[in-house]
Image (cartoon, grey):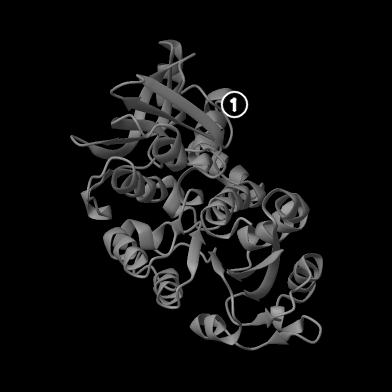
């Protein structure tokens, strides 16, 4: 039986979701793969908890929620933070879940590159470093002979990167068109069903915790544009960067526009298109009853291939446990590749 030592960087919603899914699934993974998952270090923005013997998942969540700082974890809490956490305890896989930063991709970029240099595999839910430095990160992973997985960075629990790379490898993917942001889909769905204004619907979404206090990345299409870059590089082999994507958000969509579209049998959705001819995120008219007719925080994508035609997938595109589930799927890929008994 091998211990697989995990370091979780970022202990917000997704990081706590990781602790939950590890607790829920570690016995199954032990039985299936002969590997025992052990969380040996966890860090929030300024503190950490570190123990080579392993940390208790439920206690980590309790301490963070009740005190706000992992340094209050009994016996093993510390003020070590940032890159220093990666030196403080030996680990096998970095689970990186810090907030996305599309300005300079920090601290995710530095954490990932340092883990690679230490010979560690990395699973991430982050978009910023991939959208800005995709080639650099993939080259570094290859140079250091480590695995780098990032399914959770695009569609939450909706499989899209792994679908294209592992389920459809005989196919050439010609394009991907879909709804890649759950927050905007929720807002547009509510505006359609309730006839409410953008401003009021956004406020409701924030009250429900679906939209962030600062919703700019979602409603202005920035989040979907980052995902477009990741799909362009990872699935279609297009060496795209964030500035290559034409981006328009939904903040100017009116209830009148949605009403007029509805009368003609159409919906307005924020659509991402990934193809060699077009990298774009923008509101578009889609037919009612089509694959794009989804509500709430669902995501969907239609993958057009040369041999298999169109393959459409959909799934929950947001949520801490859902995103963590996608990261756990990537972790299982690492286990199958390197650690299975």
Q: Secondary structure at mark 1?
A: helix
In terms of image quadrants, where is residue 315? Answer: top right
**Above or below, 155 relative to 47:** above
Task: Pick whichever, 288 or 193, lies toward us.
Answer: 288
Residue beneath disc 1: 194
Q: Measuring 37% from the left and 63% from the top, which residue is drawn there?
A: 129
Q: Which of the image's four quarters has the C terminus?
A: bottom right
| Residue in view at x 67 percent, y 52 percent | 33
Position of residue 328 measured from the top left corner of the image (x, y, whole percent): 61, 52
Callout 1 crowding tier (Cα within 10 Å): few <14, some 14–19, many ≥20: few
Q: Is residue 236 above or below residue 11?
A: above
Q: Is residue 309 left or right of residue 23?
A: left
Task: Inspect this view and state whether residue 157 appears.
Answer: yes
Please tell me which residue is depicted at 75% across the width and 71% down the height of the picture.
Answer: 60
Give the quarter of the image for residue 165: top left
Q: Is residue 108 above or below residue 71?
A: above
Residue 26 horizontal/vertical position (percent): 74, 56
Q: How far across and down, in percent of the image, does residue 212 sit?
A: 55, 54
Quadrant the N terminus occupies: bottom right
Residue 297 image point, x, y percent? 57, 37
């Amino acid at each position: 039986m091998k211990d697989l030592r995990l370091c979780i960087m970022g202990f917000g919603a997704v990081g706590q979701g990781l602790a939950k899914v590890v607790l829920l699934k570690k016995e199954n993974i032990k039985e299936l793969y002969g590997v025992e998952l052990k969380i040996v270090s966890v860090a929030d923005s300024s503190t950490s908890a570190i123990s080579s013997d392993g940390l208790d998942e439920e206690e980590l969540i309790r301490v963070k929620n009740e005190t706000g700082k992992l340094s209050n974890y009994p016996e093993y809490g510390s003020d070590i933070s940032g890159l220093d956490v990666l030196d403080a305890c030996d680990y096998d896989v970095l689970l990186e879940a810090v907030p996305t930063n599309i300005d300079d991709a920090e601290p995710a970029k530095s954490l990932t590159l340092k883990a690679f240099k230490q010979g560690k595999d990395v699973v991430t839910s982050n978009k910023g470093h991939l959208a800005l430095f995709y080639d650099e990160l993939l080259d570094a992973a290859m140079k250091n002979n480590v695995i780098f997985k990032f399914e959770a960075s695009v569609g939450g629990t909706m499989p899209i990167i792994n679908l294209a790379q592992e389920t459809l490898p005989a196919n050439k993917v010609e394009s991907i068109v879909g709804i890649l942001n759950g927050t905007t889909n929720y807002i547009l769905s509510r505006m359609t069903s309730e006839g409410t204004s953008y401003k009021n619907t956004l406020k409701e979404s924030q009250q429900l915790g679906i939209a962030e206090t600062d919703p700019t990345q979602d409603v202005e299409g920035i989040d979907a544009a980052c995902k477009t870059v990741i799909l362009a590089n990872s699935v279609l082999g297009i060496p795209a960067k964030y500035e290559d994507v034409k981006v328009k958000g939904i903040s100017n969509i009116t209830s009148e526009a949605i009403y007029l579209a509805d009368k003609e049998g159409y919906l307005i959705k924020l659509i991402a298109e990934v193809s060699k001819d077009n990298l774009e995120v923008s509101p578009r008219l889609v037919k009612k009853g089509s694959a794009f007719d989804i509500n709430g925080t669902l995501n969907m994508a239609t993958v057009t291939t040369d041999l298999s035609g169109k393959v459409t997938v959909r799934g929950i595109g947001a949520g801490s446990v859902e995103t963590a589930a996608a990261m756990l799927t990537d972790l299982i890929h690492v286990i199958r590749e390197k650690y299975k008994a």
